C-alpha cells in the first residue's frame, strides 16, 4: 500500500491549543511573527495548515502558557524554578522597574516578575529537551497529548454536569401532563398502581 505524500492536517486538539495560545497575552503577536518568518499569513485558515507547521509553534516553550511549563517541570522533577529574591536582583530590579508593586491589598507580583518567572521556566524546559531525543519525545507527548488545561477541565466538568441534569429530566411528564393522566384515569407513567 503506497503512502500518501500529502502532509498531515492539523488535528482538532492542535487547533484548540493554538486558539488558546493565540488568545493569551502576546500570543497573537508570536503567531503572526512565526507565520511571517515561514512565509505564511497568520490569517490563513488553521485547518488548512500542515500539522508539522502548527506543531513547531506549539512545541516552542516560548509560545506556551506558564501553567503548562510549570506542570511539565514538576512532572519531570526538574527542580523548582524560582525567581531570584529581591536582594539578588538589585541591578536587574532597577532595569526592569521592580518586581513588586503595591496595591491596597499589599505587595503583589508585578508584570516584570511574571515575565521573569516565565523566562526561567522556558530556559529550564529548553535545556531539558535539548539534552536528548527522549526528553524531546516526552515534551512533544506532554504538549500534544497529555496536557489538559485546568480551566478547560473545569468547564468540561460543568458541561458534563449540565448534560446529566438534562438526561435526568428526559422522560418526565410536566405537571400538566401528569394531572391529565390522573384526571383521565390513566396511571402516571413511572408510578405503580396502588390497587389491583
Image: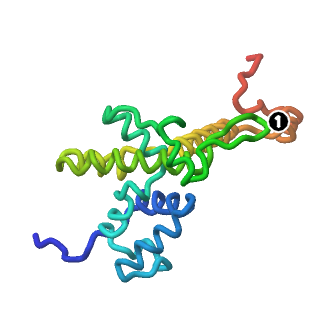
Of 107 and 188, the residue lying toward us: 107
Image position, residue 162 (x, y; %): 65, 41
Taking the view exactly as shown, the residue that stands out farthest to the top is 195
Residue 81: quadrant of the picture: top left
Q: At x 27% / y 45%, what residue is drawn? A: 128
Image position, residue 110 (x, y; %): 62, 46
Of 85 and 26, the residue lying toward us: 85
Say few, some or many: other residues with alpha carbon within 10 Å of mark 1 (under 14 / 14 to 19 / 20 or more). Answer: some
Image quarter in which the C terminus is found: top right
Residue 78: quadrant of the picture: top left
Q: What residue is shown with label 1?
A: 178
Image position, residue 115 (x, y; %): 52, 51
Image position, residue 39 (x, y; %): 36, 83
Q: Vertically, is 157 above or below 23?
A: above
Look at the numbered disc 1 and give the secondary structure of its residue.
Answer: helix
Q: Vertically, is 98 above or below 87?
A: below
Image quarter in which the N terminus is found: bottom left
Residue 190: quadrant of the picture: top right
Image side of residue 136 versus residue 186, left or right: left
Of 108 and 69, the residue lying toward us: 108
Taking the view exactly as shown, the residue that stands out farthest to the left is 1
Q: Vertically, is 166 above or below 27?
A: above
Q: At x 46% / y 69%, what residue is drawn? A: 31
Q: At x 40% / y 33%, what residue is drawn? A: 80
Image side of residue 116 versus residue 97, left or right: left
Q: At x 71% / y 22%, what residue is drawn? A: 192
Amino acid at each position: 500500500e503506497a503512502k500518501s505524500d500529502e502532509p498531515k492536517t492539523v488535528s482538532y486538539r492542535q487547533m484548540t491549543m493554538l486558539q488558546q495560545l493565540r488568545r493569551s497575552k502576546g500570543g497573537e503577536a508570536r503567531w503572526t511573527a512565526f507565520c511571517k518568518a515561514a512565509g505564511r499569513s497568520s490569517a490563513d485558515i488553521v485547518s488548512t495548515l500542515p500539522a508539522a507547521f502548527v506543531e513547531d509553534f506549539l512545541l516552542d516553550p516560548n509560545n506556551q502558557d506558564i501553567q503548562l511549563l510549570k506542570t511539565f517541570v514538576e512532572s519531570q522533577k526538574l527542580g523548582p524554578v524560582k525567581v531570584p529574591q529581591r536582594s539578588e536582583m538589585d541591578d536587574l530590579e532597577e532595569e526592569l522597574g521592580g518586581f513588586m508593586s503595591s496595591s491596597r491589598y499589599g505587595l503583589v507580583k508585578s508584570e516584570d516578575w511574571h515575565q521573569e518567572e516565565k523566562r526561567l521556566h522556558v530556559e529550564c524546559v529548553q535545556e531539558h529537551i535539548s539534552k536528548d531525543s527522549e526528553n524531546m519525545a516526552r515534551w512533544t507527548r506532554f504538549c500534544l497529548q497529555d496536557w489538559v488545561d485546568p480551566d478547560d477541565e473545569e468547564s468540561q466538568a460543568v458541561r458534563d454536569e449540565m448534560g446529566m441534569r438534562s438526561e435526568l429530566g428526559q422522560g418526565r411528564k410536566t405537571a400538566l401532563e401528569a394531572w391529565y393522566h390522573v384526571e383521565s384515569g390513566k396511571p402516571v407513567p413511572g408510578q405503580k398502581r396502588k390497587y389491583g
